[in-house]
Image: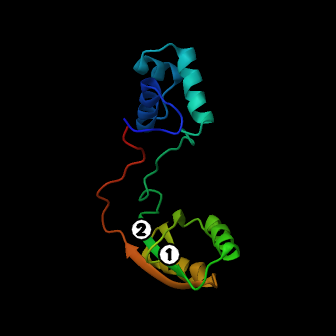
Amino acid sequence: METYTHELDATDLQILRILQANSRLTTKELAQQIHLSITPTYERQRRLERMGYIKGYVAVLDAYKMERGFMVFCNISMKQINKVIASEFRNAVGQWNEVTECYNVSGDGDYLLKVCVSSMQKYQQFILDKLGDFPYISQVRSFFVMDTLKLTYGFPM
């Protein structure tokens, strides 16, 4: 078994595994699945939330139905980087609705952005209007997603 920051018992791991698959379960339904009564189940779930193991609960939306199915990964290289520039970039990315994920990476490039828009034209508009306005970007390399082979939202336990 893997080591966790805080000691988690088998029941805690079971709760996390079940909620990853379906976070809409009521406390009663969760309690039935883990074979505990409602009160200790509720207390365990809240403790996992307070400890930061559970960051939040979300609905997974269909990108195509939401007209956001054109997915691109952008590898961003900066001309220079320091605390101020990194902070400005973080703030800018936070305002860009097209960016659904952003990572500060090592290797070839400084940032990796996941951009979800409706079309190539919308992506071009994003490049010209938003990335193009950020003064410290030296290079943008785009990787267009043709197919998703694996997409998971949880971690195996």
Instruction: State if disc 1 and disc 2 touch (CB < 8 Å).
Output: yes
What residue is shown at x 44% (from left), y 80% (from top)? Answer: 141
Residue closest to the far top: 37
Q: In the image, 52: left or right of 63?
A: right
What residue is shown at x 47% (from left), y 19% (from top)? Answer: 31
| Secondary structure state at the residue bearing disc 1 | helix
- Percent position (x, y) of residue 78? 56, 81
- Percent position (x, y) of residue 116? 47, 65
Residue nearest the viewer, comparing 57 with 4: 4
Q: Earlier in the sequence, mark 2 or mark 1?
A: 2
What residue is shown at x 40% (from left), y 44% (from top)? Answer: 155
How packed is label 1: few (under 14 Cα within 10 Å), some, or many (20 or more)? some
The numbered mark at residue 153 is none
Residue nearest the viewer, comparing 94 with 48: 48
Name the amino acid type tagged 2.
Phe
- Percent position (x, y) of residue 72? 42, 70
Name the amino acid type tagged 1.
Lys
Residue beneath disc 1: 122
Distance in Å between CA atoms under marks 2 and 1: 9 Å
Residue beneath disc 2: 70
Dividing the image into 4 quarters, which one contains the N terminus?
top left
Does residue 150 sit above or below 120 in this rendering?
above
Does residue 139 sit above or below 11 in this rendering?
below
Q: In the image, 132: left or right of 155?
A: right
Q: In the image, 84: left or right of 155?
A: right
